[in-house]
Amino acid sequence: MTAEATGRLDRGDGVELAWRRLAGRGPGVVFLGGFNSDMTGTKAEDLAAFCAAQGRAFLRFDYSGHGTSGGRFVDGTIGRWAKDAACVLDALTEGPQILVGSSMGGWIALLLALRRRERVAGLVGIAAAPDFTSRITATLEPEARAAIERDGAWHRPSAYGDPYPITRALLEDGERHLLLQGPVPIAVPVRLLHGQQDPDVPWELSLRTAAAITGPDVQVTLIKDGDHRLSRPADLLVLRRTLAALLPEDGG
């Protein structure tokens, strides 16, 4: 089994992005993590093992301000993290890639598929959360809204760890990258997986996303008892099978 190479990529301004990469046949697989997560989560580890066993190229990385990458989380925005993803894709992969985006990573994957059409062969969303900043803005309590206006950030409680900052810059920049206000012209195969017990991103969003994508090869898989993370063994099996169906047997 091929060992993962590791490294750090200067994105051009002195901020280094940490990455892990498996050499292998194409099309390769690129994992795009979620908001305030990193590349060592259960889904990323499982996909790395899957791709290693298949001899498939695989890349994962941390956005700036995430995991072991440089930069500050509070300086991050959707636009900045989408540029991080494009930088890594351009520098560390060759040929067509299948993007696998989890939560916010699903939004990043859609943006990347629009910006690098010639490099993206397919897309898998796991509880994909395009436009999530607009939903945060719409549901902010007065106290949170006042903190953002006063301090530039509000620390949102999390069921997965310590509270994390929601910044004014994140919300304002998010408005410039909204996708679901009109058609999303992506023609490659798209698969959207979503748990119907997701407390963070409503499963109906995957149906809305599928409707907005203009390409014909779009499928949504709903997991009735699935949560937001979709990291149980049964969920990971669905993910592996979904990805395998998008990958040619001969690597061509």
Image: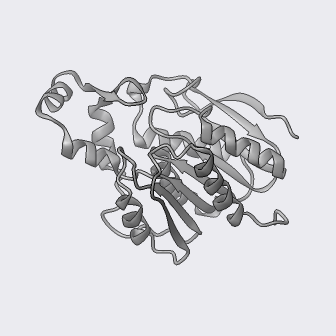
Among the 4 quarters of the image, the one containing residue 239: bottom right
Q: Work out whether residue 145 or residue 8 is closer to the camera in this orientation and state it.
A: 145
Left or right: 196 in relation to 247: left
Q: Position of residue 182 (x, y in %)?
A: 33, 68
The residue positioned farthest toward the front in the image shown:
225
Q: Position of residue 245 (x, y in %)?
A: 69, 66
Q: Work out whether residue 188 or residue 144 is closer to the camera in this orientation and state it.
A: 144
Q: Please report the residue visible at 71 percent of the width from the left and 61 percent of the height from the top.
A: 244
Q: Is residue 24 visible?
A: no
Q: Please report the residue visible at 67 percent of the width from the left and 54 percent of the height from the top.
A: 240
Q: Please report the residue visible at 50 percent of the width from the left and 23 percent of the height from the top.
A: 71
Among the 4 quarters of the image, the one containing residue 153: top left
Q: 95 above or below 47?
A: below
Q: 8 above or below 130?
A: above
Q: Position of residue 26 (x, y in %)?
A: 78, 57
Q: Work out whether residue 173 or residue 122 is closer to the camera in this orientation and state it.
A: 122
Among the 4 quarters of the image, the one containing residue 95: bottom right
Q: Please report the residue visible at 46 percent of the width from the left and 46 percent of the height from the top.
A: 103
Which quarter of the rendered picture does the C terminus lie within? bottom right
Check the image and tell me how it is coloured. one colour
Q: Is residue 175 visible?
A: yes
Q: Position of residue 180 (x, y in %)?
A: 34, 62
Q: 220 above or below 98?
A: below
The residue positioned farthest toward the bottom in the image shown:
216
How many numbered marks appear? 0
Which quarter of the rendered picture does the N terminus lie within? top right
